[in-house]
Amino acid sequence: MDKALEGVKILDMSRVQAGPSCAQLLGFLGADVIKLEDTVGGDNTRVDMAHIEGEDSVYYTIFNGNKKAMTLDLKSEKGVSIMNELVQWSDILLENFSAGVMERLGLGYTQLKEINPGLIYASIKGYGDTGPYSSYKSFETAAQAMGGAMAATGVHGGPPMPTAAGIGDSGTGLHMAIGILAALRQKDKDGEGQHVEVAMQDGVVNLMRIRLIRSLSTGEPNERGVILGKSNLPPTFACSPGGYDDYVMIHLRGQLWETVLAVMGREDLIGDERYGDEAARNERPDEVIKIVTDWTSKKTKYEVFHELASAGVWCGAVLSPEEVLTNEHLIARDMVVNVADSDRGDYKMIGCPIKLSRSPVEVERAPLYSEHTDEILRDVVGLDPEEIPSLRDEGVIV
């Protein structure tokens, strides 16, 4: 069965997370992705946070599945010649270098579109190509800070805190994937490429829409730790056996309060004016917490979750990262998969969150450093295999 993006060719020059996560997602959907790295070690996530010396880190493998990898010295004359061939091959070039780097290498959009007018040139930057901050660098938590997410995260009255989810990097990668697909659709109509640009700050602001409602509607400042409307009740309640992550999130607003009472066997409190509406419950937070915790503390978070969810209550067991990797539902949906790797040993991998009925996803291992250089030079660039050893001797490739 053909994949949705089969035949789409991507040259991924990006590093770390935002760009690689975007290219990987498109690779999951069937695109042919070449990860192009330098000749002095490549993507630094190969070694960042590595738990086994000499092996690629999980930081690298988790964002670089479904790709082939090659190396190239872009500052050498022969490297430039090979790069030009790769640009002609590509439908999409993806990069996240600091402002001006690609232009200095002779690889800016205006330069490369002369080689390939149909090229979709996808750039991820901290603050974009325009605006007063465009020359500044950024990364995950800086983007969260500048996008408003950090000010909205944390404990009420406490300092701003980053959120654990990679909304700055991976969130930007998702936005870029959407932009690339839109550009591909437009290219299908007129045959022309274009420059697609996503700023990390912009991406975070877009994901912050729900937290900007109050500022947009009333102009009042948001309060840290408050999601939708002020509440004196915590979103989570302790469960048995009382471990670090033994909590369940329960939505107690509106009519769900009475449903929760019925599930807990506290029908005697249904209609009690002391807890009859949200305002009343907010006036008695300690009493409400005790009513709920008296029940949840006798059950595991999974028991609470299943009983309440089955009754239609919005709730969720608080899963630790370790529990996410063994969660039966995620495994059943191929969001946690086992990847065969004869070089590194088999490992767990996060799968594709997008499910297409006619384009099944096969999650493939991340490539080794320079693993496919010879193959790409032969099959994509069209070099004679006998020319390749001299390129390696000259340091053009590894």
Image (tube, rainbow, N blue to C red):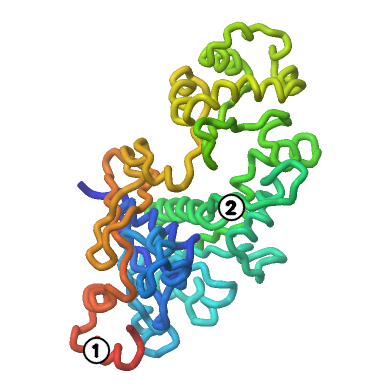
Q: Identify the residue at horizontal 71%, vertical 29% (top origin).
A: 231
Q: Amino acid at mark 1?
A: Pro
Q: In this image, 90 relative to 18: left or right?
A: left
Q: Identify the residue at horizontal 40%, vertical 58% (top origin).
A: 62
Q: Identify the residue at horizontal 49%, vertical 21% (top origin).
A: 308
Which numbered circle lies on residue 363? none
**Label 2: how many residues lie within 10 Å, few (<14), some (14-19) or many (20+)?**
many
Asked if the residue under mark 2 is in contact with the one under mark 1, i.e. CB atoms within 8 Å, the reply is no
Image quarter of the C terminus: bottom left
In the rendered view, tell whether residue 139 sits above or below residue 227: below
Q: In this image, 288 relative to 84: left or right?
A: right
Which numbered circle lies on residue 389? 1
Query: Residue 13: horizontal and vertical position, in percent?
Result: 43, 70
How many circles with numbers are drawn on the protein? Answer: 2
Q: Please report whichever mark, 1 or 2, sits nearer to the chain's N-terminal start.
A: 2
Q: Identify the residue at horizontal 39%, vertical 73% (top origin).
A: 53
Q: Amino acid at mark 2?
A: Gly
Q: In this image, 315 relative to 87: left or right?
A: right
**In the rendered image, which residue does mark 2 sit on?**
203
One can see residue 174 in this view: yes
Q: Is 244 in front, or is 397?
A: 244
